[in-house]
Image (cartoon, grey):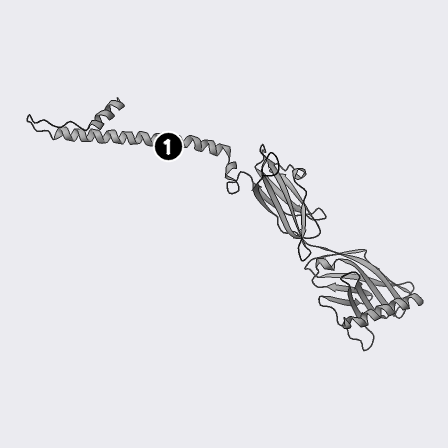
Amino acid sequence: MASRAPLFLLVICFCCCSGHAKSFIKVVCDTTITGQVAHQSMLTCKVETTQEIPDLNIAVVVWKKPGDDQFLSALDRRPDKKNKFPPGYKVTLNDRTVSLVITDPKVKDEGVYSCLVMTDSGNAETTTHFKVTAKYEAPSVDSIDEKVVPNAHKSLICKATGGYPEGKLRWFDEKKTEWTKSAEPTIVNQTEDGLLEISSKLPLMKLSTSDEYTCVVYNASDGKEGSATIRTDDPDHDPSTQNPSKTSLSAIIAPVLVIGSLIVGLLLALLICRRRSQRTHDMVPNTDQVIDPPPPYCEEFKDNMA
């Protein structure tokens, strides 16, 4: 806090001087300046004069951000003055253009900034609003069993994280028909770094005829940032919703295989019995010796086949 004391005194001095001295300058900034999280941003203003001043000397430039997270950074060009900027911030001066460079913008950097300029022809101050944005990561979609929504057998959950400000999640089927109005209200959660996680739940009715749904994430400006698609008949998600044609085909093939196996088994048994009977007949000598009859099960089997 001690290191900031000279800067606060400088601002107080500026306010006192600007109230009593006539100024021939003004500071002009864009009303809103937009930056992207984790990408260097620059808040830029220009110093203009109300009359021709060819050798304008800009002595001090101060950028401040009021509020709970008060920020103050200054460039002092007066003799014997040394500048030490807060980490991640730097004040620059190029001719009559004054800038605040934010090397690694975060959500907390968003807000209204004041730019104060002190010159040998007067002082001036103005404000600009710094907005930050962050692109959402590609969404993910999962299928869950539905036990709360009436007449719904499952629900699709779509999530997108890492974005700012609040975006939108929209649902479409394979025919590009939008189902967003059937989804529950979007849930928004903010992480420690200020970025957002948005999620949407789409209940699927038992008589739903669509097999594929796509969740699309849009930023606050309605720009598409990513999408994810899920098939509701995918056995990896729900075995009970497989393709009905495949299920009916399996139901036909299975009994045919069973019956075919039984027929093959019966034919093999008949062939074995006949071979045994033939061997027994060939082994009978030319005597009156009585030969034991073939096993009874073979006779029964022949009768059944007849």
Location of residue 31 with respect to 96 vertically, above or below: above
Q: Is residue 12 left or right of residue 130?
A: right
Residue 131 horizontal/vertical position (percent):
75, 55
Nearest the eye: 171 or 57: 171
At x 68% / y 38%, what residue is drawn?
181
Label 1 sits on what residue type?
Leu
* Quadrant of the drawing holding the C terminus: top left
Apparent side of residue 47 relative to residue 144 in the rendered image (left or right): right
Q: Residues within 10 Å of mark 1 (few under 14, many from 20)?
A: few
Q: Residue at x 82, y 69 (%)?
A: 8
The quarter of the picture where residue 183 lies is top right
Residue of label 1: 257
Q: Taking the image as drawn, is residue 76 in sight?
A: no
In front of the other: 45 or 202: 202
Secondary structure of the residue carrying numbered label 1 = helix
Q: Position of residue 38 (x, y in %)?
A: 68, 59
Q: Is residue 79 left or right of residue 214?
A: right
